[in-house]
Amino acid sequence: MEEFVRNRITQLRLNKGVSEYQMSYALGHSRGYIYNISSGKALPSMSEFFSICDYFGISPKAFFDIQQENPVLMDKVTDEIKTLSDDDIILLFTLIRRLNHHPEITR
C-alpha cells in the first residue's frame, strides 16, 4: 500500500505538471517534503493525505481508484453530471452505453 501511495502521488503530480518542490511549497512544507514521500523515506499523515487530495482536486476515493488514470478529470465530470436533470442523465447514460458497445464510433 505504501508503494501505491508513493506512485499515485507521483503520477498525479506529473499529470499536473508540477515538480516535487513546487508541490511541497504549495502544501506549506519544505522543498524536500514530496521527494521524501516519493522516495519512500516518509508517508503523509492522514491530514496531509487529505491536503494532497485537495491539492489535486480529487476525493480520497478517486485517489485509490486504480482503474482511473485521470481521477481529476473523472471527478470534474462527476461534479458536472450531478447538476443535470434526471432526463439529461438518462440521455448521457444512453450515449455512454452506446459508445462502450461501439468503440469504433469514437475513432
Image (cartoon, rainbow, N blue to C red):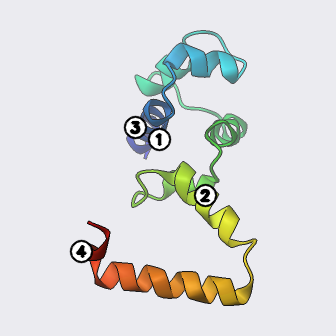
Q: Are marks 1 and 3 in contact (CB under 8 Å)?
A: yes
Q: Judge the density around disc 3: few (<14), some (14-19), many (≥20) Cα neighbours within 10 Å.
A: some
Q: Residue 20: where, in percent of width, then height?
A: 51, 19
- Amino acid at the residue labelled 3: Asn
Q: Residue 38: where, in percent of width, then height?
A: 44, 26
* Residue that carries the numbered disc 1 in the rendered image: 5
Q: Residue at x 56, y 49 (%)?
A: 72
Which mark's residue is nearer the viewer, 2 or 4? 4
Q: For the C terminus, which image quadrant?
A: bottom left
Mark 2 and mark 4 lie on one chain; the one further toward the N terminus is 2
Which element carries disc 4, helix, strand or loop? helix
Mark 3 and mark 2: span between their CA atoms?
20 Å
Which element carries disc 1, helix, strand or loop? helix
Q: Residue at x 28, y 82 (%)?
A: 102
The quadrant where residue 23 appears:
top right
Any mark on residue 13, and which? none
Mark 1 and mark 3: span between their CA atoms?
6 Å
Which element carries disc 2, helix, strand or loop? helix
- Amino acid at the residue labelled 1: Val
Which mark's residue is nearer the viewer, 3 or 2? 2
